[in-house]
Image (spheres, grey):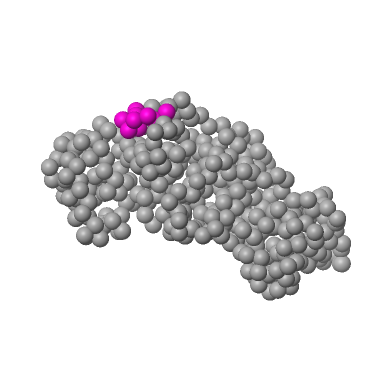
Amino acid sequence: MDKDTYLLLTKSNFTCKFVNKKCKYNYQYFEINTSMRNFPERLKSARKMNGFSMQELADKMNNVVSKQAIGKYELGVMKPDSEILSAICKALNVRPDYFLREGKITLENVEFRKLTRLSKKDIEKIREQTIDFLERYFELENLLGIDSKFNNPLKDTVIDHESQIEEAVVKLRKSWKIESNHVPNLIKLFEDQGIKVFEIDAPDSFSGLATYVNNSPVVVLNSNLNHVLDRKRFTALHELAHLLLKFSRKFDQKQIEKLCYAFSGAFLMPKELFINEFGGVRHNVFIEELKFMKQNFGISMQAIMARAKNLKLISEQYYKTFSIQFSKLGFRKKEPGAYQGYESSNRFFQLLYRAVAEEIISLSKAASLNNQKLADFREMLASY
């Protein structure tokens, strides 16, 4: 065990028992004292974070403990010894100090929209992995003395009519000082504005979710969307719309979803810029034209045509005809002309490296915040 974790454990609810000097920092020789108040809850969270049932966790630990014993650990009626703790950490891919974190953040008003194919286990896994990341993120900001405040320029805006979406986008873009410009890196823009972005490896049926934590907006995206960046950008804005906008009670959930889609299109394709590039009112549009526009705006051809319809640059009938033809060509599932851009969340790592460079935290603490072994973090640091 590294020195920082050793000190953390000995100052907390663990006592150290040395067998010999060579094994000084090996947590195989740590014995758990009588009080580990957070352990039951955090064990359950870590198990769900990995998508394990109690039996699956027992199997992952080569059945050194039974499913029943794990149940008792989670109820707090039994505590693992040092050998079992070691096996638990290895099976769940967490460091021992994971179980010593104080408190647990809460995701506010999370809605898993249109995700009927997601199992309860998948939902729990996404939720717990998001919580774990945000716990580490907020701790890092606290260590750096960063007060991550977010100003919502649309907080007093209530959408009562579809036309107000356009007004909301103009107001937001003006506040963020991007006016009518293209947005080459949407995720960076989010992070620059105080929106936390977490990318998670999840089933294809999950695209994203939005929530607030400690008054900070959080957008969670499926990392598999990196293969279709135009969809990733659209999804990120769709989730942002759910966070920033308030909707009149006259809209049902399906209508709200459509308004959020309209928000995404309007944000990525500002009205005046879009009309100029689309060429005004059109009666026919070629796929090759849409490929160029897709590269310019970083958005799908389907969204481009939907935007054109909303701005009345094409007729409803032409849009229907185009959509039918698009489906027949198989382009709804895989469009031609992949968007080439860069969309990745980097702020957490940037702050982590800053904290190490300024000697605010040790390498060991940095590894802990990144949920890595110290050797792995050193290797990652050396590769840059």
Quadrant position of the N terminus in the picture: bottom right
Left or right: 277 with respect to 364?
Answer: left
| Along the viewing direction, whichever of 177 and 73 lies nearer the viewer | 73
In the image, residue 173 sits, relative to residue 85, either above or below, namely above
Single out the residue that lies furthest toward the left.
Answer: 283
In the image, residue 224 sits, relative to residue 315, either above or below, namely below
Residue at image coords 35%, 32%: 165
Left or right: 272 with respect to 95?
Answer: left
- Is residue 310 visible to us here? yes
Quadrant of the rendered image containing residue 327: bottom left
Image location of residue 186, percent across then percent down: 41, 42
- Is residue 183 visible to us here? no
Count the numbered circles shown. Answer: 0
Residue at image coords 86%, 67%: 20
Left or right: 65 with respect to 300?
Answer: right
Image location of residue 140, percent across then percent down: 63, 43
Quadrant of the rendered image containing residue 32: bottom right
Left or right: 221 with respect to 26?
Answer: left
In the image, residue 119 sits, relative to residue 218, either above or below, namely below
Image location of residue 373, percent across then percent down: 66, 59
Q: Which residues are magenta?
A: 158-167
Residue at image coords 57%, 51%: 127
| Along the viewing direction, whichever of 78 and 101 lies nearer the viewer | 78
Image location of residue 201, percent across then percent down: 50, 58
| Along the viewing direction, whichever of 38 and 288 lies nearer the viewer | 38
Residue at image coords 66%, 72%: 59
- Residue 63: say if magenta: no
